[in-house]
Image (cartoon, coloured by chain):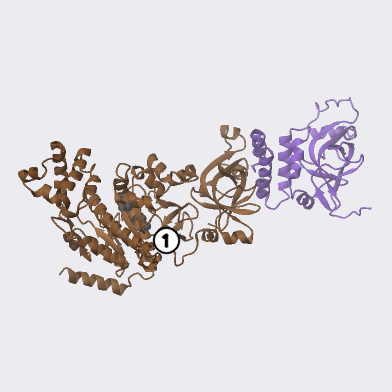
Amino acid sequence: MRSINKDSPKKIAEVIEASATQFSAQCYELYEIPPLGSLVRTGDIYGVVAGAETTSLEPGRKPIARGKDEASEEAVYESSPQLAKLLRSELTAAVVGFKNGDKVVQYLPPQPARIHGFVYLCQPDEIRDFSRSFGFLNTLIDADLPVPDEEVVAATLRQMSQAHGDSRTFLVAAGKELAALLSNDYLRLKNILGRLTPA
Amino acid sequence: MVENLKLGIVTAASLEKGVDVRLDAPVSVEDMVVGRYVTIEGQKRRFFGMITDVSLGVTDERLAISPPDVNDPFIADVLTGTSTFGTIHVTPMLTISGDAKAVLEGPQPVKTIPAHFAAVNLASEQDIENVFGKEDKERFNIGNPLDMETKLCLNLVELVKRSNGIFGKSGTGKTFLTRILLIGMLQKSQAVNLVFDMHNEYGWIGTREGGGTAKGLKQLFPAKVAVFTLDEESSRRRKVSTDFVVKIGLNEIMPEDISILRSTFNLTDLAVEAAYQLYKILGHDWLNKVLNLGEEELEELLKGATIHEGSFENLKRGLGSIGRLGFVVPEAKGDSVKNILDFLLQGRNVVLEFGRYQEIGAYLLVANLLSRRIYSRYKEQMEEAIAVDNEALKPRPLVITIEEAHKFLNPEVADKTIFGTIAREMRKYNVSLLVIDQRPSGISEEVMSQMGTKITCLLDNERDIDSVLAGVSGKNELKSVLSRLAPKQQALIFGHAVPMPVAFQPVAYDAKFYASLTGAGQKSTTEQVEKDIEELWK
Ligand SMILES: Nc1ncnc2c1ncn2[C@@H]1O[C@H](COP(=O)(O)OP(=O)(O)OP(=O)(O)O)[C@@H](O)[C@H]1O
Ligand SMILES: [Mg+2]
């Protein structure tokens, strides 16, 4: 049994759908979806947040507009406390690797994630550990994602760079890896690089 | 630059076309200059090659169409070496195998190519030394390979085994380079030099562009060098310590000396023909007679000969200009030749200054005439030594230096002049040439092909470049190196005396160089010589 200590990553969601390349998870709190590109883990499997949505709990039933007579958006939720129970936030993660014993490998795991598996948001240490190599970029570029993959790749690298002391060096190294991967698709490369430049 | 810097990896290669190398990201294309040496670490052997082209590559043509924002340092950092990269083209020149036996055999010609992704490094000082050797009793430091600090050493003993050439357009440093080579020969080889010094640059003192002087051979090696002059007055004015004043007798001039002057003196073929006829009829003193006898007397002598009037006049006009040269006397007893030979056979180098007689006609006449006679003496001596099978009797190897070589060795006259003979004989009689020329395309192809080692400074005329590189393997690649040499003090050497072609910067001919010469006249002796000259010309 895993002992809980203060360094443990935070449990944020639970897997509700899983395939070899992706998994979806329902967040425990409405709207508390990790940012696009965040590194998450369920069991031994690593994923990158590649899409998110907040929908009505009951499929096919759309919420109705309620704010016409309210002063603020918060007021809408305050006057209808049941709303939080009728809506839910979900994330979709692209699988980018897994833990094989002690080693992190950056290719698809032999099995998909387990339903009801807890999803943790990785902390800087784990992110640094994972992003020591860039094999995952290839997986991401080739994945069939709900969000344009250029956005996901860029968001992932931006997120990861924050865990690295010298984020520019990290981004340049990652950029070079991308340049090699996209050697015959300069326009795609350009789109991604344009989204990496620290503003 | 850092020793053994890794430049990149081999991405393509063929024996015919050479090796393509993709540069690593940190290596700037702008540091890659044509002519530099690199090593390629193959699996079984190392290759030595010269950078012969530098280019830029992109992985995707669209990069060139909509260029990235390179002002953004991030984008620039990412793209250099990845999507945009530099490539160099390397022409392999030599290989060294890894096993012990091969190390003994030394560098070998290239018969294969390195495998994919073999690492390419800048050649280190040690690499260059392994190939060209260290300064020793046969090797002389002539400069540094381009952009390197290593000494480039030339084996002078090998060099003087054949005739050699120094080329380059005007003002590129041929004279300075020649002086360096002459000093090298003087120090490291058994050969003795005879220099026909048209512009008085080699013997005592030379000039530098932009002012200043350069020491001549005798100032540096007073005991080993003698200066002969054709123009005593000019030498005295220039305070040159001369050893002998050379006179040429009309009786020493032969019809073949006239034939080399044909185009210089605008002689017709028939006029040259007439010279031979006159010689046959009038004997050794033919020139004297032609120039000095009265018309009737001459007519009497030439009765029966079929010399066309016009040809005779044409010839006489040409001969007249020879007669007017200040160093030409009616009769000489061959003292000049004898003296030069005496010095040479004692191992003293002779520089013959032309003083004010710098017109090409005088130069051709004197160089041809003296060389012809010296050569025939060499030939006799060699034949005698061979007859009795005695090495010791063989005369010392002689190297004759001539400038404006194309005037002696153009296809029209090359097979008639003594120089053509010497060039073709590959020093059968221990005589070889050092030719200096700014228009090598004027030299006969056959003569060019006989030259053992060629050193060429910048040439910009396509035909000159072609003629210098004719028959060299990797000609096209070397061409790009040659045509990109600096306009001064850079040269390319290739041929017999070097294991592979190399572009280099000749040593600076200055006080530091003088001081580095072993056995060069110590200060005291130079001063002594200067005193002697003062005495001499009092
Ligand atoms: N090794 C050298 N050391 C110092 N200076 C040099 C050297 N080589 C060339 N130079 C400089 O370049 C100038 C031209 O060189 P040099 O007289 O040798 O040219 P050249 O090729 O003989 O020219 P030309 O065809 O006119 O005779 C020299 O006057 C000198 O200033
Ligand atoms: Mg010169």
What amino acid is found at the position of numbered circle 1 in the picture?
A: Leu
Can residue B459 be seen from the camera position used here?
Answer: no
Q: Is mark 1 within 8 Å of ligand 1?
A: no
Q: Residue at x 85, y 25 (%)?
A: A64
Q: Is residue A186 above or below residue B98?
A: above
The part of the image, by quadrant, that contains residue A16 is: top right
Q: Is residue A93 above or below residue B8?
A: above
Which chain: brown?
B
Identify the residue under disc 1: B156
State left or right for residue B35 relative to residue B283: right
- Front in this rendered view, residue A102 or A12: A102
Which chain: purple?
A
Quadrant in which the C terminus of chain B is drawn? bottom left
Q: Residue at x 20, y 45 (%)?
A: B276
Image spot of residue B125 (x, y percent): 53, 60
- Judged from this view, the residue extending furthest toward the bottom is B524
State left or right for residue B185 relative to residue B368: right
State left or right for residue B446 relative to residue B228: right
The part of the image, by quadrant, that contains residue B144 is: bottom left
Can residue B237 be seen from the camera position used here?
Answer: yes
- Front in this rendered view, residue B363 or A67: B363
Image spot of residue B257 (x, y percent): 23, 49
Image spot of residue B314 (x, y percent): 16, 40
